[in-house]
Amino acid sequence: MRDWVFQHEPALRLGTFLAILAAMAIWEIVAARRALSQSRPIRWWANLGLAVVDSLVVRLLFPAAAVGVALIAEQRGWGLLNHFEIPYVVALVVAFLLLDLAIYLQHVMFHAVPLLWRFHLVHHADQDFDFTTGIRFHPVEILLSIVIKFTVIVALGPPPEAVFLFAIVLNATAMFNHGNVRMPAQLDRVLRWVVVTPDMHRVHHSVEVDEANSNFGFNLSWWDRLLGTYRAQPRTGHREMIIGLEQPRDPAVCDRLPGMLALPFRGSATAYPINRRWDAR
């Protein structure tokens, strides 16, 4: 069974991705949380187009997936967890939690380091917030993220099953927590004790700098609470808050594929460590 899963890992991940994508699209159409400033076809064409570019670049430069790196690490005894006799279930849970912590810390780093923010700002330049925002990342950011992920896997030595499960869950939660969807307030309060909900993560996409530098989690909500970056609600409320960056706000730059690809190469390289502003010219 294990060999079959890993042999068909790309197809399984793609199938899960498409199923979650379809479910979120239907949910947003049926029960939208906010009105969009751009039409859905324009947004989906640009953001999904960027995701396709990302996939092509990754396949070209990194034909080996993270699961493959984890299998090599397991075979060669690389990584912390491979040096201890740990029950399989414990290793699975510990690896999943540490991989999620690594994603949280990586996200903070992409806000804190100006050169990294250059590429991450493409994600934040979206002036709307829906499930396609969750897959809207510049190809350079994706490549840097893969290098970081491979490094963490080699250092940690997680079970390959944990890496596979984490990739599936992260893809699903990234689209879920960026969803422009309504849910009962009580359900949101309960869920966000464990996972990042759309209302929780929407705060992170506020134009207000202090709000944008909160709620960094993509999957589990615990890291923000434990490390002091949690913010419950935006000051002006979810319907009135402004999404995106103060600058740029030109749709040709922020919401069209050529503009998104070129955006990191505009403006000053020293412009946006945490709590400073981006000056795009």
Image (spheres, rainbow, N blue to C red):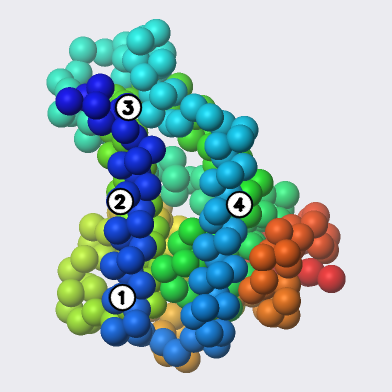
Q: Amino acid at mark 2?
A: Thr
Mark 3 vs mark 2, CA separation in Å: 16 Å
In the rendered image, residue 10, in percent from the top left (x then y), is placed at 38, 38
Q: Amino acid at mark 4?
A: Val
Mark 1 vs mark 2, CA separation in Å: 16 Å
Residue pointed to by mark 1: 26
Point 26% across, 13% down: residue: 84
Nearer-N-terminus badge (3/2): 3
Within the image, what quadrant is residue 47 found in? bottom right
* Mark 4 residue crowding within 10 angstroms, few (<14) / some (14–19) / many (20+): some
Q: Is residue 107 positioned above or below 88 on the image?
A: below
Quadrant placement of the C terminus: bottom right
Which of these two is toward me, 216 or 126?
A: 126
Mark 4 vs mark 3, CA separation in Å: 24 Å
In the rendered image, residue 258, in percent from the top left (x then y), is placed at 73, 64
* Residue 83 relative to residue 235: left or right: left
Mark 2 vs mark 4, CA separation in Å: 19 Å
Question: In the rendering, which numbered label is found on residue 16?
Answer: 2
Point 30% across, 58% down: residue: 19
In the rendered image, residue 7, in percent from the top left (x then y), is placed at 32, 27
Q: Is residue 187 positioned above or below 112 on the image?
A: below
Q: Secondary structure at mark 4?
A: helix
Question: In the rendering, which numbered label is found on residue 7?
Answer: 3
Q: Secondary structure at mark 3?
A: helix
Nearer-N-terminus badge (2/4): 2
Q: Are marks 3 and 2 in contact (CB under 8 Å)?
A: no
Question: In the rendering, which numbered label is found on residue 53?
Answer: 4
Q: Amino acid at mark 3?
A: Gln
In the rendered image, residue 250, in percent from the top left (x then y), is placed at 73, 80
Q: Amino acid at mark 1?
A: Ile
